[in-house]
Amino acid sequence: MKYVDDFRDKELARGLAAAIAAEAEPSHRYHFMEFCGGHTHAIFRYGVQELLPSNVRFIHGPGCPVCVLPVPRIDQALELAERHGVILCSYGDMMRVPAGGKRSLLSAKAAGADIRMVYSTQDALKIARDNPEREVVFFAIGFETTTPPSAVAIRQAKAEGLGNFSVFCNHVLTPAAIQHILQSPELRDMDSVTIDGFLGPSHVSAVIGSRPYEYFAQEFQKPVVITGFEPLDVMQAVLMLVRQINAGSAEVENQYARVVTPDGNRKAQELVAEIFELRRMFEWRGLGQVPYSAQKIRPEYQDFDAELRFALTDTGATDVKGCECPAILRGVKKPTDCKLFGTACTPDNPQGSCMVSSEGSCAAYWSYGRFRQEAVGA
Amino acid sequence: MSGTKRKFPQRMKFSSGQVEMTHGGGGRAMAQLIEELFVRHFDNELLAAGNDQAVFTAPPGRVVISTDGHVVSPLFFPGGDIGSLSVHGTVNDVAMSGARPLYLSAGFILEEGFALSDLERIVISMAAASAKAGVPVVTGDTKVVERGKGDGVFITTTGVGVVPEGIEISGALARPGDAVLVNGFIGDHGTAILSKRENLEFESEIRSDSAALHGLIAHMLAAETDIHVLRDPTRGGLAATCNEIAWQSGVGMHLMEERIPIRPDVQAACELLGLDPLYVANEGKLIAICPGEKADALLAAMREHELGRDAGIIGHVRADENRFVTMETGFGGNRIVDWIAGEQLPRIC
């Protein structure tokens, strides 16, 4: 495949691996958090880890959109479909994520709720147009990449006077989460997890640009290299991070210059700012309450806010007992540290969100990497 | 002049008619549908005999039987339709034992209101596939369900065949040191279906690989009888089939990503849609496992046949009590090739 295979070239990978091995100092530890689930997926799918020396390690971050949504928000989505009888439109990744009471969108659908998997917000708008007698709610999730399409849908619905359409907004922000991780007591005081640098998001950065990372690179003295989702991108970013650590610098560098600019996509940013505003507080699975880390629909567009249109209850439901997703999402524990991993919790029968999405670290460990644990008898 | 001497006074209107409840009711309408559609197109003596069963003498050897339900959506797709698919699917399941498929039976579940023109088109395609394969449909059944209780048409086919003396093929027979072969490009069928799905349509020239593989298998067996395993990687794709075999045989398997034949446009479509071609369904592909030292001869035989031109050796079997299917990625790393969790795409066959 032209323009794709080039970024998966084995020979170039060998060259980069040799350079990393030569430059990483054996006495030093290099622990890098890849924030995005997309990177986690690439690392496992292509077997990147084993091309690196043993003192260069990845810590998998919380950047998996379906993983970070707390259980009560999924319960509310179910409430929309079941109690309020709406047509609930959801991206496919969300369908199998466990909600409270061992339920999921998929199980509610099987029990008769009208839940439809869509590939874009445009599909949801079409469903609303085709079913004028029904309320149609789009279950909006994801980081800065999926926010602009939700904004477009809301603006379009207003322009068309599509009164039966609304959005259940759960869009969250990347920089706020990274900052929250860096401020967590585990990192600051307890020293139970060491993060020496970050692989910055690819698609998110295409929208927000590279500037938003400058504050915490400086404040927390952690280098950030924004990088693409192809395995060669990841390896090159690792080399850049190793060089920064060796040089004692903490800069924001952009490996993904073919897509990401310092300012990002202005048009998308303006659109998002027109429709959404920051929530003062939002709960993340794993991270807890994170200030100014999520979007809500502005008062000017409140007619399209499902949270205002329908009465929703906070079930306060928590993760399944024993599930380590919260600690795994913070990078404090590895999937294999969880007692449920591979026993009660597998991709076919997920107990926690990290086992559901292909971007979740538990699913990546299980689906691509578990032979390594077996090999060392763990 | 009198119509009373004719069994069916009016001919069926296939161009404008639709399936009605009476077509499954056991009366004259059903008899007419069977005669003017199924008997006419499937065109063989056993079916024309008009009994509720087909009676025949089986040739010597062990008898094989296999059954497969078909619910694909859409019913018509590039490279085939539910009719041809229902023949190929079952012929292949029988043939993967090394058997020569002999006969098929077909059960149709029709939805009230389904266009007779579409049904006729499907039956004609099924008859053509069965004639080409040389495996006639010799008995069958028709039921009609109320509108809204089906999805146009579902077809279940059952096939019988006979395994010749000296052939011993089973998913439990893969042994460490064996080679793993595939007869061509993977992922075509699932991607072709996907390209015609509502909400997802994209322009492509990808066609389903739907084909009957017993001719290829006969050719392979003529060259090399020492084949341990044959299996067609349908739902769940190559990944699921390799895992099934590893589990059944109690072995591990190691694949080489670079050697797995995938068309660039299938690769590109999967890339775009976030699918992995290893999990995408095939309907004209087989995995063959044979002793490593016989792999080159078997590969040469496969490549002589039109359905094996792009065949390749994609990996090997190894001892592994965990029964992992692993793969060296094109990038140079290693990973597990696991079973699919959930489904990438429903109702592809």
Image (spheres, coloured by chain):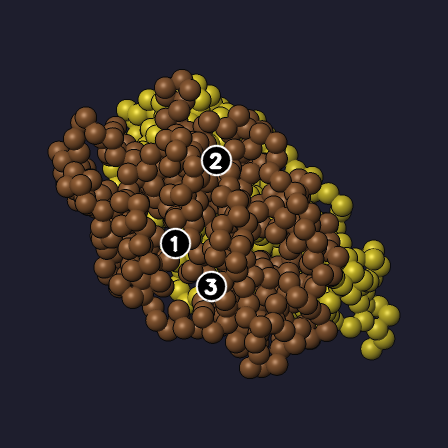
Chain colours: A brown, B yellow
Which chain is home to disc 1? Answer: A
Q: Secondary structure at mark 2?
A: helix
The relative height of residue B87 versus residue A2 in the rendered view (above or below) is: above
Q: Residues within 10 Å of mark 3 (few under 14, many from 20)?
A: many
Q: Earlier in the sequence, mark 1 or mark 2?
A: 1
Which chain is home to disc 2? Answer: A
Which chain is home to disc 3? Answer: A
Mark nearer the viewer, 2 or 3: 2
The relative height of residue B118 versus residue B307 in the rendered view (above or below) is: below
For disc 1, the marked residue is A175
Q: Nearer the viewer, residue B280 or A251?
A: A251
Q: Pinpoint residue A58: horizontal percent, then vertical percent.
A: 32, 37
The residue under the point 39% across, 54% down is A175
Q: Are marks 3 and 1 on the same chain?
A: yes
Query: Is residue A290 visible in the rendered structure shown here?
Result: yes
Q: Nearer the viewer, residue B304 or A200?
A: A200
Say the numbered circle drawn on residue A327: 2
Q: Earlier in the sequence, mark 2 or mark 3?
A: 3
Q: Decide if residue B334 is on the left or right side of residue B340.
A: left
Q: Residues within 10 Å of mark 1 (few under 14, many from 20)?
A: some
The residue under the point 29% across, 35% down is A31
Q: Pinpoint residue A47: horizontal percent, then vertical percent.
A: 31, 37
For disc 3, the marked residue is A147
Say the numbered circle drawn on residue B78: none
Q: Earlier in the sequence, mark 3 or mark 1?
A: 3
Image quadrant where one finds the C terminus of chain A: top left
